[in-house]
Amino acid sequence: MLRLPAEWEPQHAVMLTWPHAATDWAGQLEDVEAVYLRIASRIAHRQRLLVVCNDPDHAEHVRRLVVSVGVAPPTVGLAVAPSDDTWSRDHGPLTVTDVAGRAQVVDFRFNGWGAKYPAAQDDRITARLHADGWLGDAELVTSLLVLEGGAIDTDGEGTALAVRRTLVDPARNPGWDQPHIEAELAARLGLRRVLWLHEGQLDGDDTDGHIDTLARFCTPATICHVTAHAAASPAERGALTALAQELARLRRSDGRPYTLVPLPAPAPIHDEQGAPLPASYANFLIINGAILMPGYGDPADAVAAERLAACFPGRTVEVVDCRPLIRQGGSLHCITMQLPAALGVPVNRKH
């Protein structure tokens, strides 16, 4: 029997795919690398890092950067795998464990969120990492299902949350109906239930409604979810009100309702052309002993941090300014992928 660990379980490392000049970050590379360095430094205080670099020269560049902020080389592994973009959450490996606690790496397909963007190199990253020994001795299992890691959130007990249109989608999975997808998730990830949501969408989100921007498990009984700012568009306010109502109707496997924790929203953020950007406090990262929460320079940052701290007693909440990240439509959780303790990634090997 397979099990997909909850994100709050002990971790060995966090994977980052580092920005480079051939990505959409080229015009703001210095700003976005500064955010990556802040995140890398905070992670490295508590666990290891696995950084995917575009080529050997890029790996040397990243090595110099992380050393400059006090991240010791034994703490970080610098893997080399060409990348189209840097959203590790969506192209990175998902790790499951069996009843004996052995890890298995599942490599789902990634097609750029329904062929919206180039993704052929990103789709090969997990297989490359495995072939080069960066994922330890875990077995690699491949799936033909297109599944982005940001599209599901799990409680570690066999239940997942997902927005239906991010999986049951002819641009992602032509010919796959919901029962077929559920069977594949059960076989590859050990999921027993998928709680399919139909509501919820942030203005400017081009993932079609990734769950990690909308609602997250904090415990198997608790779900936090985003709410709309008073100045948000009518469409966003309506979608997030409907999401809260839909979440209230969900039931745990024992029939009890979930405890719901609303998160505030920052004031609307727009790009230089005036297009909305999908800033969300639900896009936090759980690491050993802490929550890294995206901040947007807004008074709501402090309110969101306080509410998440109450959801995760024993973990400190650290706010990282993610305004440079949101310019490309994602945030802190989107650029990271946790690697659980069972994987035992040898991040101190040479690239």
Image (cartoon, grey):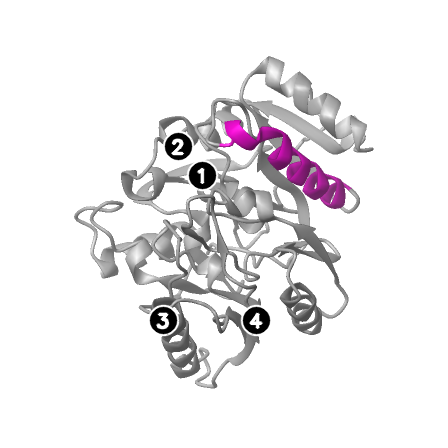
Which amino acid does the dot numbered 4 rest on? Leu
Q: Nearer the viewer, mark 1 or mark 4?
A: 4
Which amino acid does the dot numbered 1 rest on? His
Residue tagged by mark 2?
A: 123
**Does dot 4 land on a helix, a strand or a loop?**
strand
**What is the residue that sits farthest to the top in this orientation?**
57
Residue tagged by mark 3?
A: 234
**Does dot 3 land on a helix, a strand or a loop?**
helix
Sequence-wise first label, 3 or 2: 2
Residue tagged by mark 1?
A: 91
Can the viewer see residue 276 in this picture?
Answer: yes
Q: Estimate the x, y position of residue 200 in percent, counting from the top left.
A: 38, 67
Which residue is drawn at the image coordinates 47% and 54% (left, top)?
2
Q: Main secondary structure of the magenta part?
A: helix
Q: Nearer the viewer, mark 4 or mark 2?
A: 4
Sequence-wise first label, 1 or 2: 1
Sequence-wise first label, 1 or 4: 1
Sequence-wise first label, 4 or 2: 2
| Front residue of 191 and 339 | 339
Residue tagged by mark 4?
A: 263
Relative height, residue 269 to residue 120 (above, below): below
Callout 3 environment at 10 Å: few (<14), some (14 to 19), or many (20+)? few
Q: Are marks 1 and 3 in contact (CB under 8 Å)?
A: no
Which residue is drawn at the image coordinates 24% and 52% (left, top)?
169
Sequence-wise first label, 1 or 3: 1
| Front residue of 202 and 109 | 202
Q: Are marks 1 and 2 in contact (CB under 8 Å)?
A: yes
Q: CA distance from mark 1 to mark 4?
A: 27 Å
Q: Which residues are magenta?
A: 25-44
